[in-house]
Image (cartoon, grey):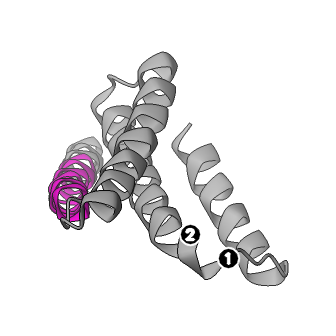
C-alpha cells in the first residue's frame, strides 16, 4: 500500500509538471491550502500504514474533510479580512513534521530489528 501511495504521488507530480494546466490566479491560495491538506493526509496515511493501523475509509474521509476545512478557512478568512488560513498552515504543517518524525523513527526501528535478526542468524 505504501508503494502504491508513493507511486500515485510521483505520478501526480509528473503529470502536474508535464501537463499545461492553468487556473485563475485568485484561486491559487485555495489550491495551495488544498495541496497542504492533501499532503498532510497522505503523510498521515503512510504513518498509519507503517504502524499497521491503516484504514481506507478513515484515509478517504480525512482527505476530503481536511481539504474542505482548509478551503473553508481560507475562504472565510478571505471574506472577513482575517488570516484564518494560518490555522490550517500551523495545524497541517505541524502534523506534517510530527508524522515525518514518527515515520523516520519507525523506519529506523524496523531497520535495526532487521539488522539485529540478520546478525543473530549468523
Relative placement, left or right, of 29 versus 26 is left
| Image quadrant in which the N terminus is located | top right
How many residues crowd mark 2 within 10 Å: few (<14), some (14–19), many (20+)? few
Q: Position of residue 19 (x, y in %)?
A: 85, 77
User: In the image, residue 21 lies at what x, y percent?
Assistant: 80, 75
Tell me: residue 30, above or below residue 29. above
| Label 2 close to label 1 by CB (< 8 Å) | yes
The verdict on residue 108 being magenta is: yes
Q: Is residue 41 left or right of residue 109?
A: right
Stretch of the chain drawn in magenta = 85-110
In the rendered image, the vertical position of residue 80 relative to residue 118, given as above or below: below
**Direction from residue 20 to residue 26 in the image, left or right:** left
**Could you give the CA–CA distance between mark 2 and mark 1, rounded to whole angstroms?**
6 Å
Q: Position of residue 11 (x, y in %)?
A: 72, 63
Which quadrant of the structure image shows residue 82?
Answer: bottom left
Question: Label 1: which residue?
Answer: 24
Residue 65 point in image, percent of width and height: 41, 32
* Front in this rendered view, residue 103 or 16: 16
Sort mark 1 into few (<14), some (14-19) or many (20+) by Cα contacts within 10 Å. Answer: few
Name which residue lies at 66% across and 71% down.
13
Query: At 39% across and 61% down in the image, what residue appears?
Result: 36
Residue at 47% across, 63% down: 30
Secondary structure of the magenta portion, mostly?
helix
Q: Which residue is mark 2?
A: 27
* Secondary structure at numbered mark 1: loop
- Frontmost residue, 13 versus 72: 72
Q: Tag 2's secondary structure?
A: helix
Q: Residue at x 32, y 22 (%)?
A: 53
- Which residue is nearer to you in this view: 50 or 40? 40
Amino acid at each position: 500500500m505504501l508503494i502504491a501511495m508513493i507511486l500515485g504521488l510521483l505520478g501526480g507530480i509528473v503529470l502536474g509538471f508535464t501537463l499545461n494546466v492553468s487556473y485563475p490566479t485568485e484561486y491559487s491560495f485555495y489550491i495551495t491550502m488544498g495541496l497542504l491538506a492533501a499532503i498532510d493526509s497522505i503523510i498521515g496515511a503512510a504513518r498509519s500504514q507503517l504502524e499497521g493501523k491503516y484504514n481506507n475509509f478513515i484515509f478517504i474521509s480525512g482527505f476530503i474533510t481536511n481539504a474542505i476545512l482548509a478551503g473553508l478557512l481560507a475562504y472565510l478568512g478571505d471574506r472577513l479580512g482575517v488570516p484564518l488560513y494560518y490555522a490550517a498552515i500551523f495545524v497541517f504543517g505541524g502534523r506534517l513534521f510530527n508524522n515525518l518524525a514518527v515515520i523516520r523513527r519507525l523506519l529506523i526501528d524496523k531497520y535495526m530489528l532487521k539488522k539485529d535478526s540478520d546478525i543473530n542468524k549468523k
